Amino acid sequence: MSNYYGKRTFSNYHYSHNQLSRDNPFRVMGTTYNPYLPKTSNQSNYDLKDNNQKKLNPLERSANFDGNNKISKSPITPYKLINTRAYYKNAKQNYSLYPQNRDHVGELFNYTIKDNAPYYSGNTNNMDSNQLKYTTYTTPKPRNNRNRDRGDSNEIISNSNLSEYYEDNCTLIKNFAYKEDPNSKYRDYMEDKGVSILNINGDPDKALFCLFDGHGGDKVSKFLQSNFIQYFKEILPLDNPKEKLTSLFKKLDERIKELNCYQVGAAACIIYITKERGQKYLYSANVGDTRSILISNNEYKRLSYDHRANDANEYKRIVNNGGIVLGGRVYGSLMLGRAFGDWELKSYGVTCEPSVTRINITNNDKYVIIATDGVWDVFEESDVFDLSRKINNSKDLCNTLVNKSILNGSMDNISCFVISL
């Protein structure tokens, strides 16, 4: 998608935490001025008390003063007095090279990390310590799998530090492959996180695969990668999957709120495969647009649901819960209607309640594919199905999907699981 700028953006409407208003969605740092609207007669230059200082135009004025001719009282303080030349210089430096990184007005005015930390939203110019390793166009160096003894009765947990791995020491499934790529042509940071576990609680008939697509930073996706499996074990067995998985997602989201993730979030898709009384079952649960599909010998079907704000059902639900959708985004900011985190928008229709699917696995079923929208932005499901008929193993199919996504012009981080049933 040529005009794709990420799920969390402030490129069109600038909001800060606690500044959203149903009456005036264009409040900017304590003023009603909106630099993206045409200039009107009441937006004339303002005189400063000190006549020796130069006059500021409306753009400069809105960045430094509120409507009462006082220094603006924003949560992001202190402000540095800027002029138009500095504004456009910073805009060119920070935004032109990576337009998809326009995540927060704070980076535009060069606030320090300390001042901006509670409202950090992912721009690479003000990264926190957790993202320093992504400042260059490299992926994390692979390390050995963080596995316990690889016997069938012991858990096998995939190592989160690997950008690519393949596992064939499986009982419930044949094998699976995982591959990720930050897509360095467009992104010099990685927000996607994947993790999997076989032989849950020592049971070879239970396996879980999780993929988290962060936006506004990797704080939420990283938390889910580290904690989701442990929380998931607590709700087993899934005798009431919809109720239990919804409760699990909400419990994790409350923990994420404690991390002050008001403008950071993540889409998520999990696949749980189990064997009960000789029959294999598959459970899918997702929020956001990380998608899973089931590929059989002669057909394919989607298991997840894309929760985007421009979807008819999501749009109606958001509006009924007091939200506003501007340009296909909740309050012009968040592309997703459902996600972990993004707590500043939770009272405006954004939720973490997942869509849940349960199916029987038959001998005709061949692959389950979980991928972030870095794949689905440039691939139709029918294209993936056609590839699966030409490629006969999960590792090669996974590598092909990621590599072809880059060649096809994807502008996002790319991650993919291919599970051979």
Image (tube, rainbow, N blue to C red):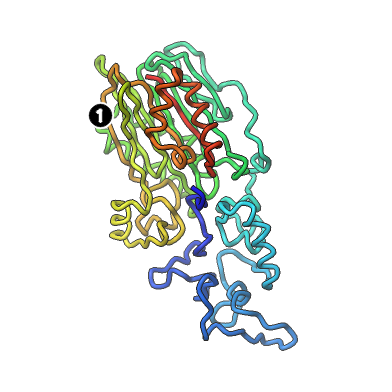
Lateral position of residue 11 relative to residue 255, left or right: right
Q: Which residue is depicted at the point 43% across and 68% down?
A: 25
- Return the x and y of residue 416 as percentages of the image width and height: 48, 31
Q: Nearer the viewer, residue 401 or 125?
A: 401
Packing grade of label 1 (10 A; few <14, some 14-19, many >=20) is few
Q: Which residue is depicted at the point 38% across and 28% down?
A: 385
- Return the x and y of residue 393 as percentages of the image width and height: 46, 18
Quadrant assignment, res 299: top left
Asked if one can make out residue 128 in the rendered structure from this viewpoint, the answer is yes
- Return the x and y of residue 215 as percentages of the image width and height: 50, 47
Q: Quadrant of the C terminus?
A: top left
Amino acid type, callout 1: Asp
- Number of on-image labels: 1
Q: Secondary structure at mark 1?
A: loop
Q: Which residue is depicted at the point 41% across and 32% down?
A: 383
Asked if one can make out residue 155 in the rendered structure from this viewpoint, the answer is no
Q: Nearer the viewer, residue 271 or 7?
A: 7
Q: Which residue is depicted at the point 60% across and 45% down?
A: 186
Lateral position of residue 158 relative to residue 327, left or right: right
- Return the x and y of residue 151 as percentages of the image width and height: 47, 11
Image vertical order of residue 152 relative to residue 59, above or below: above
Image vertical order of residue 108 relative to residue 402, above or below: below
Quadrant assignment, res 252: top left
Residue underneath mark 1: 239
In the displayed orientation, state which residue is furthest to the top: 151
In the displayed orientation, state which residue is furthest to the right: 52
Q: Nearer the viewer, residue 24 or 371?
A: 371
